């Protein structure tokens, strides 16, 4: 597993670099960075994971609070977790299931995913474009596309303009 982790890290950084070059080409409307090469699906997925990991790393643990044995969010930023989790897990018999592993509740699932991704505690399974996290000795596989949809749904309120009839210029 250690060799796989090292290989994952090398590809992770290489893919992030290639994706940044791809973005530079798009922003500058010039192909001098990637020199006409297109970005591979593998590079795209790994760069996506890099961005998601960074977002989760910046998210502080103090967003989540434990009270009387229950876990809940302190802020409304992540208030749509129930909708977002549908991209990752099936809800069966009162538990959230990912790759045959059962999480007791949505906040435990979220906290586990957040911690694993924020701290790089995962490996990348390239062929089907998914990550593998270890949860209590179990390998849990998550498709990168499902993870991306989860994150977009989770942070949708941050990306949505609340009132498009108002424009404020801060000078």
Image: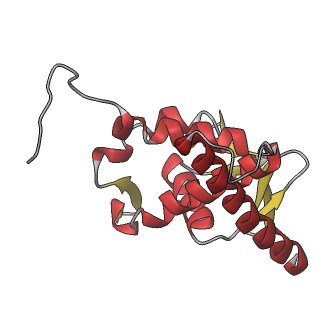
Above or below residue 111? Residue 88 is above
Instruction: Out of 36 and 112, give the one closest to the viewer.
Output: 36
Q: Position of residue 154 (x, y in %)?
A: 47, 41
Instruction: Out of 90 and 11, give the one closest to the viewer.
Output: 11
Residue farthest along the bottom direction in this orientation: 2
Instruction: Tell me how the rendering is colored.
Output: secondary structure
Q: Quadrant of residue 63?
A: bottom left
Q: Quadrant of residue 164?
A: top left
Left or right of 30 in this view: 34: right
The residue at 80%/59% (across/down) is 124
Left or right of 67 in this view: 58: right
Instruction: Out of 159 and 23, give the one closest to the viewer.
Output: 23
The residue at 12%/39% (across/down) is 169
Above or below residue 123? Residue 154 is above
Q: Total marks drawn?
A: 0
Q: Quadrant of residue 158?
A: top left
Residue farthest along the left direction in this orientation: 171
The residue at 64%/50% (across/down) is 48
Q: Position of residue 26 (x, y in %)?
A: 59, 41
Above or below residue 57? Residue 21 is above
Left or right of 40 in this view: 22: left
Q: Position of residue 121 (x, y in %)?
A: 68, 71
Q: Quarter of the image containing the N terminus?
A: bottom right
Q: Position of residue 61 (x, y in %)?
A: 40, 67
Q: Is residue 135 visible?
A: no
Q: Is residue 60 visible?
A: yes
The residue at 65%/54% (across/down) is 21
């Amino acid at each position: 597993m250690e060799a796989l982790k090292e290989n994952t890290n090398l590809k992770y950084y290489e893919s992030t670099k290639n994706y940044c070059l791809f973005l530079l080409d798009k922003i500058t409307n010039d192909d001098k960075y990637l020199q006409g090469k297109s970005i591979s699906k593998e590079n795209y997925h790994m760069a996506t994971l890099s961005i998601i990991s960074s977002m989760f790393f910046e998210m502080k643990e103090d967003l989540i609070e434990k009270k009387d044995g229950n876990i809940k969010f302190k802020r409304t930023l992540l208030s749509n977790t129930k909708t977002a989790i549908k991209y990752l897990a099936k809800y069966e018999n009162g538990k959230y299931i990912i790759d045959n592993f059962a999480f007791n509740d949505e906040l435990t699932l979220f906290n586990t995913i957040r911690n694993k991704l924020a701290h790089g505690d995962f490996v990348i399974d390239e062929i089907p474009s998914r990550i593998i996290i270890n949860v209590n000795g179990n390998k849990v596989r998550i498709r990168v596309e499902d993870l991306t949809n989860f994150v977009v749904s989770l942070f949708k309120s941050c990306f949505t303009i609340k009132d498009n009839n108002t424009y404020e210029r801060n000078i």
